[in-house]
Image (cartoon, helix red, strand yellow):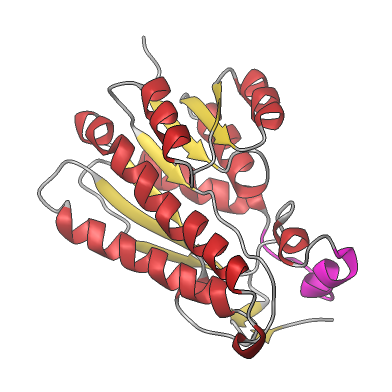
Amino acid sequence: MTRPLAVVTGASSGIGAASARRLAREGYEVVCAARRLERVEALAKEIDGRAVRCDVTSADDVAALAAEVGPRVDVLVNNAGGAFGFEPVAEADLEAWRRMYEVNVIGVAAVTKALLPALIAASGVIIVMGSTAGQVAYEGGGGYVAAKHAAKAVVDTLRLELYDQPVRVSEIAPGMVKSEGFAITRFSGDEGKAEAVYAGVAEPLVSEDIAEIVAWIASLPSHVNIDRLTVRPRAQAAQHKVHRV
Protein backbone atom coordinates (compact mmCIF):
# COMPACT_ATOMS: atom_id res chain seq x y z
CA MET A 1 0.00 0.00 0.00
CA THR A 2 1.07 3.59 -0.59
CA ARG A 3 2.39 5.21 2.55
CA PRO A 4 0.75 8.43 3.79
CA LEU A 5 2.85 11.48 2.97
CA ALA A 6 4.26 14.06 5.36
CA VAL A 7 6.20 17.21 4.51
CA VAL A 8 8.54 18.72 7.11
CA THR A 9 10.20 22.07 6.49
CA GLY A 10 13.37 23.00 8.31
CA ALA A 11 14.14 19.29 8.48
CA SER A 12 17.93 19.56 8.44
CA SER A 13 18.30 19.64 12.24
CA GLY A 14 16.59 20.02 15.60
CA ILE A 15 12.82 19.70 15.85
CA GLY A 16 12.43 19.31 12.10
CA ALA A 17 14.79 16.35 11.83
CA ALA A 18 13.33 14.73 14.96
CA SER A 19 9.78 15.16 13.58
CA ALA A 20 10.76 13.61 10.27
CA ARG A 21 12.25 10.58 12.02
CA ARG A 22 9.23 10.22 14.29
CA LEU A 23 6.70 10.42 11.46
CA ALA A 24 8.72 7.89 9.47
CA ARG A 25 8.44 5.47 12.41
CA GLU A 26 4.67 5.94 12.18
CA GLY A 27 4.75 4.75 8.57
CA TYR A 28 4.83 8.05 6.72
CA GLU A 29 6.88 8.74 3.64
CA VAL A 30 8.51 12.01 4.67
CA VAL A 31 9.58 14.76 2.32
CA CYS A 32 12.45 16.42 4.16
CA ALA A 33 12.78 20.05 3.07
CA ALA A 34 15.50 22.48 4.11
CA ARG A 35 18.12 24.85 2.76
CA ARG A 36 21.01 22.49 3.60
CA LEU A 37 20.49 19.83 0.95
CA GLU A 38 23.34 17.55 2.03
CA ARG A 39 21.83 17.22 5.50
CA VAL A 40 18.30 16.44 4.35
CA GLU A 41 19.66 14.01 1.78
CA ALA A 42 21.36 12.08 4.59
CA LEU A 43 18.20 12.20 6.68
CA ALA A 44 15.99 11.08 3.80
CA LYS A 45 18.28 8.14 3.14
CA GLU A 46 18.16 7.19 6.83
CA ILE A 47 14.34 7.18 6.99
CA ASP A 48 13.55 6.08 3.42
CA GLY A 49 12.09 9.45 2.55
CA ARG A 50 12.72 12.18 0.00
CA ALA A 51 14.92 15.25 0.20
CA VAL A 52 14.15 18.64 -1.33
CA ARG A 53 16.26 21.75 -1.09
CA CYS A 54 13.82 24.45 -0.02
CA ASP A 55 14.33 27.93 1.34
CA VAL A 56 10.77 28.77 2.41
CA THR A 57 11.40 32.44 1.66
CA SER A 58 12.03 31.62 -2.02
CA ALA A 59 8.95 31.46 -4.27
CA ASP A 60 10.82 29.25 -6.74
CA ASP A 61 11.89 26.80 -4.03
CA VAL A 62 8.37 26.58 -2.62
CA ALA A 63 6.93 25.95 -6.09
CA ALA A 64 9.51 23.21 -6.64
CA LEU A 65 8.57 21.65 -3.29
CA ALA A 66 4.89 21.59 -4.27
CA ALA A 67 5.76 19.99 -7.62
CA GLU A 68 7.83 17.30 -5.89
CA VAL A 69 5.13 16.55 -3.33
CA GLY A 70 2.33 15.92 -5.80
CA PRO A 71 -1.47 15.90 -5.44
CA ARG A 72 -1.90 14.59 -1.88
CA VAL A 73 -0.29 15.52 1.44
CA ASP A 74 -1.47 14.04 4.74
CA VAL A 75 0.67 16.10 7.11
CA LEU A 76 2.46 19.42 6.71
CA VAL A 77 4.83 20.40 9.50
CA ASN A 78 5.67 24.08 9.04
CA ASN A 79 8.78 23.95 11.16
CA ALA A 80 11.25 26.23 9.33
CA GLY A 81 11.96 29.30 11.44
CA GLY A 82 14.48 30.79 13.78
CA ALA A 83 15.56 33.66 15.99
CA PHE A 84 18.37 36.06 15.08
CA GLY A 85 19.77 38.31 17.79
CA PHE A 86 18.83 39.29 21.33
CA GLU A 87 19.06 43.08 21.29
CA PRO A 88 16.50 45.46 22.80
CA VAL A 89 14.12 47.11 20.36
CA ALA A 90 16.03 50.41 20.68
CA GLU A 91 19.10 48.67 19.23
CA ALA A 92 17.26 46.40 16.77
CA ASP A 93 19.02 44.97 13.75
CA LEU A 94 16.14 45.63 11.37
CA GLU A 95 17.56 43.37 8.69
CA ALA A 96 17.47 40.49 11.19
CA TRP A 97 13.86 41.42 11.99
CA ARG A 98 13.01 41.20 8.29
CA ARG A 99 14.70 37.79 8.05
CA MET A 100 12.74 36.52 11.06
CA TYR A 101 9.44 37.75 9.62
CA GLU A 102 10.22 36.21 6.25
CA VAL A 103 11.06 32.75 7.55
CA ASN A 104 8.66 32.51 10.50
CA VAL A 105 5.61 34.13 8.90
CA ILE A 106 5.85 34.54 5.12
CA GLY A 107 7.45 31.11 4.82
CA VAL A 108 4.58 29.47 6.71
CA ALA A 109 2.03 31.26 4.54
CA ALA A 110 3.86 30.43 1.30
CA VAL A 111 4.27 26.71 1.97
CA THR A 112 0.73 26.37 3.28
CA LYS A 113 -0.70 28.17 0.25
CA ALA A 114 1.30 25.99 -2.15
CA LEU A 115 0.33 22.69 -0.50
CA LEU A 116 -3.23 23.48 0.56
CA PRO A 117 -4.96 21.80 -2.42
CA ALA A 118 -2.99 18.62 -1.71
CA LEU A 119 -3.86 18.81 2.00
CA ILE A 120 -7.55 19.24 1.21
CA ALA A 121 -7.42 16.28 -1.16
CA ALA A 122 -6.01 14.10 1.62
CA SER A 123 -8.10 15.51 4.52
CA GLY A 124 -4.75 16.44 5.99
CA VAL A 125 -3.38 18.38 8.94
CA ILE A 126 -1.28 21.55 9.03
CA ILE A 127 1.01 21.77 12.05
CA VAL A 128 2.75 25.10 12.60
CA MET A 129 5.71 25.21 14.95
CA GLY A 130 5.06 28.32 17.00
CA SER A 131 6.56 29.32 20.33
CA THR A 132 5.62 30.63 23.75
CA ALA A 133 7.29 33.76 22.34
CA GLY A 134 4.10 34.07 20.31
CA GLN A 135 2.10 34.35 23.54
CA VAL A 136 4.22 36.42 25.94
CA ALA A 137 6.76 39.16 25.22
CA TYR A 138 10.17 39.23 26.90
CA GLU A 139 13.10 41.60 26.93
CA GLY A 140 15.48 41.02 24.05
CA GLY A 141 12.87 39.02 22.17
CA GLY A 142 11.95 41.90 19.91
CA GLY A 143 11.71 40.69 16.36
CA TYR A 144 11.30 37.01 17.27
CA VAL A 145 8.41 37.75 19.62
CA ALA A 146 6.77 39.86 16.93
CA ALA A 147 7.27 37.18 14.28
CA LYS A 148 5.90 34.36 16.43
CA HIS A 149 2.89 36.48 17.42
CA ALA A 150 2.30 36.96 13.70
CA ALA A 151 2.65 33.23 13.05
CA LYS A 152 0.05 32.59 15.76
CA ALA A 153 -2.28 35.01 13.97
CA VAL A 154 -1.77 33.12 10.70
CA VAL A 155 -2.77 29.86 12.43
CA ASP A 156 -5.88 31.42 13.97
CA THR A 157 -6.91 32.95 10.66
CA LEU A 158 -6.40 29.70 8.78
CA ARG A 159 -8.51 27.86 11.34
CA LEU A 160 -11.38 30.29 10.72
CA GLU A 161 -11.04 30.29 6.95
CA LEU A 162 -10.78 26.50 6.60
CA TYR A 163 -13.56 25.61 9.05
CA ASP A 164 -15.65 24.05 6.26
CA GLN A 165 -12.75 22.18 4.65
CA PRO A 166 -11.42 18.71 5.58
CA VAL A 167 -8.17 20.15 6.92
CA ARG A 168 -7.07 20.44 10.54
CA VAL A 169 -4.94 23.42 11.62
CA SER A 170 -2.79 23.12 14.74
CA GLU A 171 -0.03 25.08 16.43
CA ILE A 172 2.55 23.65 18.79
CA ALA A 173 4.00 26.38 21.02
CA PRO A 174 7.12 25.10 22.79
CA GLY A 175 8.89 26.89 25.61
CA MET A 176 12.50 26.10 26.42
CA VAL A 177 13.79 23.48 23.98
CA LYS A 178 17.48 22.63 23.87
CA SER A 179 17.57 21.81 20.19
CA GLU A 180 20.44 21.61 17.79
CA GLY A 181 21.42 25.01 16.51
CA PHE A 182 18.60 27.26 17.80
CA ALA A 183 20.52 29.22 20.44
CA ILE A 184 23.77 29.06 18.48
CA THR A 185 22.02 30.70 15.53
CA ARG A 186 20.38 33.30 17.75
CA PHE A 187 23.73 34.34 19.21
CA SER A 188 25.65 34.20 15.90
CA GLY A 189 27.72 31.18 16.87
CA ASP A 190 28.64 32.32 20.38
CA GLU A 191 28.63 28.99 22.24
CA GLY A 192 28.99 30.59 25.66
CA LYS A 193 25.87 32.70 25.27
CA ALA A 194 24.00 29.76 23.78
CA GLU A 195 24.85 27.47 26.69
CA ALA A 196 23.93 30.16 29.22
CA VAL A 197 20.30 29.96 28.07
CA TYR A 198 20.06 26.43 29.51
CA ALA A 199 22.53 26.79 32.38
CA GLY A 200 21.36 25.03 35.53
CA VAL A 201 18.17 23.68 33.94
CA ALA A 202 18.30 19.97 34.66
CA GLU A 203 15.85 18.89 31.99
CA PRO A 204 14.92 21.35 29.26
CA LEU A 205 12.77 19.97 26.51
CA VAL A 206 14.58 18.35 23.59
CA SER A 207 13.64 18.03 19.95
CA GLU A 208 12.35 14.49 20.37
CA ASP A 209 9.80 15.69 22.95
CA ILE A 210 8.26 18.03 20.38
CA ALA A 211 8.41 15.33 17.69
CA GLU A 212 6.26 13.11 19.92
CA ILE A 213 3.60 15.82 19.97
CA VAL A 214 3.80 16.21 16.19
CA ALA A 215 3.19 12.48 15.75
CA TRP A 216 0.34 12.52 18.28
CA ILE A 217 -1.49 15.36 16.55
CA ALA A 218 -1.03 13.65 13.19
CA SER A 219 -2.43 10.40 14.60
CA LEU A 220 -5.71 11.82 15.84
CA PRO A 221 -9.00 11.18 14.02
CA SER A 222 -9.72 13.67 11.26
CA HIS A 223 -12.53 15.34 13.22
CA VAL A 224 -10.26 16.14 16.21
CA ASN A 225 -8.45 19.49 15.95
CA ILE A 226 -5.83 20.56 18.49
CA ASP A 227 -6.05 24.31 18.00
CA ARG A 228 -2.96 25.10 20.06
CA LEU A 229 -0.77 23.07 22.39
CA THR A 230 1.63 24.92 24.71
CA VAL A 231 4.43 22.79 26.10
CA ARG A 232 7.23 23.70 28.49
CA PRO A 233 9.70 21.72 30.57
CA ARG A 234 8.58 21.20 34.15
CA ALA A 235 11.33 23.60 35.26
CA GLN A 236 9.85 26.46 33.25
CA ALA A 237 6.62 27.66 34.85
CA ALA A 238 6.49 30.77 32.66
CA GLN A 239 8.67 32.69 30.23
CA HIS A 240 10.47 34.46 33.10
CA LYS A 241 10.23 31.77 35.78
CA VAL A 242 12.73 28.94 35.32
CA HIS A 243 14.13 26.69 38.02
CA ARG A 244 17.92 26.51 37.84
CA VAL A 245 20.18 24.59 40.17
Judged from this view, the residue extending furthest toward the front is 95
Image point 67% across, 48% down: which residue?
Answer: 14
Q: What's drawn in magenta, residue-wise? A: 190-205
Residue 215: % across, % down: 47, 42
Q: Is residue 141 visible?
A: yes
- On the rendered image, what quadrant is the N terminus found in? top left
Image point 42% across, 40% down: which residue?
Answer: 59
Image point 77% across, 67% down: which residue?
Answer: 187
Above or below, comparing residue 7 to residue 177 in the picture:
above
Q: Would residue 182 appear left or right of 184 to someone viewing this image?
A: left
Q: Would residue 38 appear left or right of 245 to someone viewing this image?
A: left
Asked which quadrant contains residue 11, the reply is top right
Q: Can residue 232 be seen in this view?
A: no
Q: Is residue 76 in the magenta section?
A: no
Above or below, comparing residue 43 to residue 239 in the picture:
above
Residue 148: % across, % down: 47, 68
Q: Is residue 197 in the magenta section?
A: yes
